[in-house]
Image: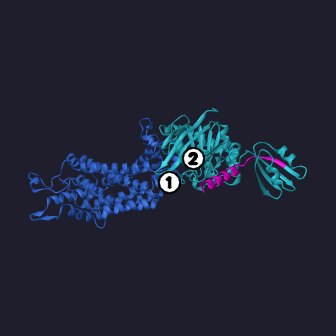
Chain colours: A cyan, B blue
Amino acid sequence: MAGEVVIRAEQLTKRYGANLAVDHIDLEVEAGEIVGILGPNGSGKTTTILMLLGLTEPTGGRAVVAGFDPLRDPLEVKRRVGYMPDQVGFYDGLSARDNLAYTGRLAGLPRRDIDARFADAMERVGLAAVGRNRVRTFSQGMRQRLGLAEVLMKRPSVAILDEPTTALDPHSTQEFLEMIRGLKADGTAVLLSSHHLDQVQSVCDRVALFNRGRIALAGTVTELAGQVLGGGHVIDVEARGPGIAERLAAVPGVVRVQALGGERYRVDCQRDLRAEIARRLAPEVELVGINFAAPSLNEVYTRYFEEARHAAQ
Amino acid sequence: MPLSRRPDARRRGSPWTGLGAVVAKETADHLSSARMRILEALVFLTAIAAAYAAIRSIRQTIGESPFLFLRLLTLSQDPLPSFIALLGFLIPLVAIALAFDAVNGEFNRRTLSRILAQPIYRDALLLGKFFAGLLSLTIGLVSLWLLVLGLGLLLLGLPPSTEETLRMLGFLVATIAYGGVWIAIALLFSVIFRAPATAARAALGVWLVFALFWSVITPLVTTLIAGPPEGVFGPRLAYLQTQQIIDRLSPNTLYAETALALLQPATRALGPVLISQLQGALLGSPLPVSQSFILIWPQLTGLVAATIVIFVIAYIVFQRQEIRA
């Protein structure tokens, strides 16, 4: 049901000896929502996923997934959660059908349902023609699709996908992202961990940025841009004339001006200032173009970690 | 205190959920794998050859022993060792082959997190793999047992007596228990070592120690603990008893003693016997089958207990591992 919180983590913590892998994180995901979790390697994303699945024990805090506590009711959680790990592996000597039938039996699916669900899932991921083939004949991209088929077969209320588009070509990536949107359309909440920021931005409703075990930023990309880039609105300006960067910086509400080379400038601002900018540049500067640009998650990410590095130094 | 140790955080759900699915899948994998077929063929050929050679020898001396079928298993004829000696040698190899890559193979294939993301506990996965190995071994051994029995019926032209059948069944159970120990050892190494080759080498190393070097190690350790073997009045009882205890730490010894007591009914004791204990005994007369079972009961219990202890160690190590593959 839309609006229902299906993943809730409160002060979730994981410590390995002296190392704090996940540091008191709070996270909420609603049904039918796609939330991206980003961050450098070792920032705590996978550990968080494993705690939400009940595969590793939190040191502190609590989580509720699909209405159950993964620590106390891991079997109930795992019945309702589909998980696709990064570099998903299968039994190469078995066919795709036998691989998924095995996990279907482990998931407690009735035998009579397994074949129907398998056929449906394979159809959705575009592997219907190779269901009886051994997995050793599959390319990495096909294995990724098979991993998603396994998630679909379970018909979960929560899908956790860890680096699902690694090793996919651009066309397959787009198809895969479309399948993830299909999960959202089914009402499934999706937690998507990825390093491909453009992909995350294209499918995710919200994003949580992990750094050193903490969720450093969380919200929509626009909200994150507001926090990191200082504005949240980005305007691309193309103009010819003297002192353009200074003129742009002098416009009230402009947070930052970046020269992109040639006659192009990127302006971060707190609101839509296109009309004001056009007025301020005229008449000494010839305005060639002015466009409202969506904030880039890539830019948010890069800027955040640049600033974090400077702060650490 | 870790969260899971709090009373309110005790895990719900049966630890055996999914056990049947794991056992079925793993057993099917074992029975259809080329590795198992090669090993089974090796065991069958050598064991059948040993039994056949024994039958030829028995036919020439028929009537000398009331336990022809038992002699089928214990008699050796050059160049082949006896059926039970061959089994004692080959069963650990088959057991190790069944389990050396049970858990590390899942890590290396990167299937472990996918499997454990299904509603099962690690308990079911590990136990399922153990049971599947044991079931595969049992299927092979029962087939072999029936084959030897059939061969005996055909070539000797006599059916086995009830006592012989009971003794052979007891031997079959003991062989399965012996295989269980080696499956547990291989499973333990498959949990400890990520590389299957390392796990296999470690398990084979343990097997070599018990199969070849234990008879060398035992007297050395016994002398260190109990002093010299000979006293002023001959062999020292303390030495013999210590040697026996150390010797019985080896599953091979326990299995050999079990086979001896069951398949050679005249065996009346498994250890040093004092002259005073022989008073009134009819030497060479067979023990009733029930007495033979009482005689091997500690050995059989020891094999089962060793299996459980080794499995529990593997279980604890596995429970403490991080699942990231």
Left or right of residue B206, residue B20 in this image: right
Q: Quadrant of the C terminus of chain A?
A: bottom right
Stretch in magenta: A290-313
Q: Is residue B115 magenta?
A: no
- Pointer 1 residue: B107
Percent position of residue B196, x then y: 46, 59
Q: List the residue tagged with mark 2.
A: A214
Residue type at tag 2 = Arg
Whether residue B18 is visible: yes
User: Considering the image in quadrants, where does the N terminus of chain A appear?
Assistant: top right
Other residues around mark 2 within 10 Å, as few (<14) / some (14–19) / many (≥20): many
Residue drawn at point x = 62 percent, y = 39 percent: A189
Helix, strand or loop at disc 1?
helix
Name the spot of residue B62 as percent of width and height, x first.
Answer: 22, 57
The residue marked by circle 1 belongs to what chain? B
Give amino acid for label 1.
Phe
Q: Is residue A43 left or right of residue B226?
A: right
Circle 2: element type = strand
* Magenta-span inclusion, residue A299: yes
